[in-house]
Amino acid sequence: MSELYMRELLRISVAQICQTVGYNATQAAPLKVLQDFLDKFLKEFTKYLRRQVEHCNRTEPNLNDLALTLSSNNINLEELRDYVDNVGPVPFVIEVPKFPRRIVL
């Protein structure tokens, strides 16, 4: 259940990113490919980030860990900064509750 929920949120995120950069329509198959790519990238990225943090004997990442993880994944920080400067933030189209929800008994 939670995997389906997270994949649906990824699908919405990918669609919003595509819309933000200029696409106004897409077919289901390319959207699914981008969704799968983002899913795999986020899992690998967070796994590598966690390894960096644990290697430094910490429990929470800092900006240095993030920068090292980005550069290790061949992500150009200057290009990322340029993208962030030129593309404004886009609010998520639906309200996402905190996940997982606590059950109140």
Image: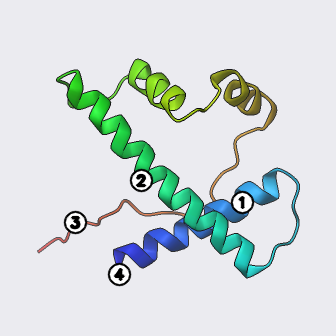
Disc on the earlier residue, 2 or 3: 2
Q: To which residue does mark 3 refer?
A: 102
Q: As shown in the figure, which amino acid type bears the numbered disc 2?
A: Lys
Q: To which residue does mark 2 refer?
A: 43
Q: Quadrant of the C terminus?
A: bottom left
Real-space CA distance between mark 3 and mark 1, rounded to the nearest whole angstrom: 29 Å
Relative side of 74 to 66, left or right: right
Please name the colour scheme applied to the rendered image. rainbow
Q: Classify residue 22 by image quadrant.
A: bottom right
Q: Could you say which is closer to the camera, residue 19 or residue 79?
A: 79
Disc on the earlier residue, 3 or 4: 4
Q: To which residue does mark 4 refer?
A: 1
Q: Could you say which is closer to the camera, residue 52 or residue 1?
A: 52
Real-space CA distance between mark 4 and mark 2, rounded to the nearest whole angstrom: 18 Å
- The location of residue 46, given as percent across then percent down, is 39, 44
Q: As shown in the figure, which amino acid type bears the numbered disc 1?
A: Gln
Seen in the picture, residue 79 relative to 103 is either above or below; the reply is above
